[in-house]
Amino acid sequence: QVQLVESGGGLVQAGGSLRLSCAVSGTTLAINRMGWYRQAPGKQRELAALITSLSSTTYADSVKGRFTASRDNAKKTVYLQMNSLKPEDTAVYYCYVQISIHGDYWGKGTLVTVSS
């Protein structure tokens, strides 16, 4: 059974930094894309950052230059380093992974709150 365990959310002041982590367990298959989506109150879930198995990255325009996605394939873990955080970054952040044959999986979400 595939499980995604997220950590690293919390409360931070504007301009601060947080690092999210998401560890995948329960599979020996290749993990293709990994990343993070976020959902702010009253808004739809949106892409924050994606990273492929070859470490090619895609970012939402709103986070470019501030967020950095990375992965450790040996640990089956994806990270999101978030710097220069803004109040509008406040959201529940969901880990996403695409596993060969199995399909797409989501974490339960971790809340990031940025105070002004």
Image (spheres, grey):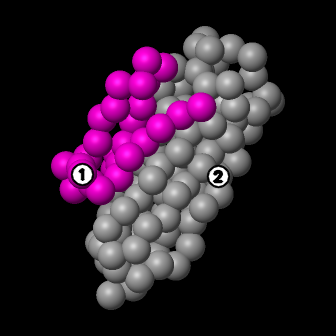
Residue at (35, 25) in percent of width and height = 56
Give, as a three-letter code, the residue at label 2. Glu
**In whole angstroms, how far apart are the C-alphas of marks 1 and 2?**
23 Å
| Quarter location, residue 8 | bottom right
Q: Is residue 17 left or right of residue 27?
A: left
Query: Which residue is painted at 75% across and 22% down in the image?
Result: 27
Q: Which mark is residue 98?
A: none
Which residue lies under the disc numbered 2? 6
Q: Position of residue 5 (x, y in %)?
A: 70, 48
Please tell me whether mark 2 sits on a helix, a strand or a loop. Answer: strand
Pair 1/2: label in front: 1
Residue 116 in which image quadrant: bottom left
Check disc 1 and report the residue beneath it: 65
Q: Magenta segment: does it hold 71?
A: yes
Vertically, is 86 above or below 99? below
Residue 31 vs 5, above or below: the answer is above
- Quadrant of residue 109 in the image? bottom right
Question: Which residues make up the magenta segment?
Answer: 46-72
Image coordinates of residue 58 in percent, x first then y, are: 30, 35
Screen quadrant of the N terminus: top right
Amino acid at the residue labelled 1: Gly
Left or right, 39 with reference to 10:
left
Q: Check contact, mark 1 vs mark 2: CB within 8 A.
A: no
Crowding near the residue tagged with mark 1, few <14, some 14–19, many ≥20 C-alpha atoms within 10 Å: few
The stretch drawn in magenta includes residue 69 = yes
Please provide percent x and percent y for residue 93: 49, 57
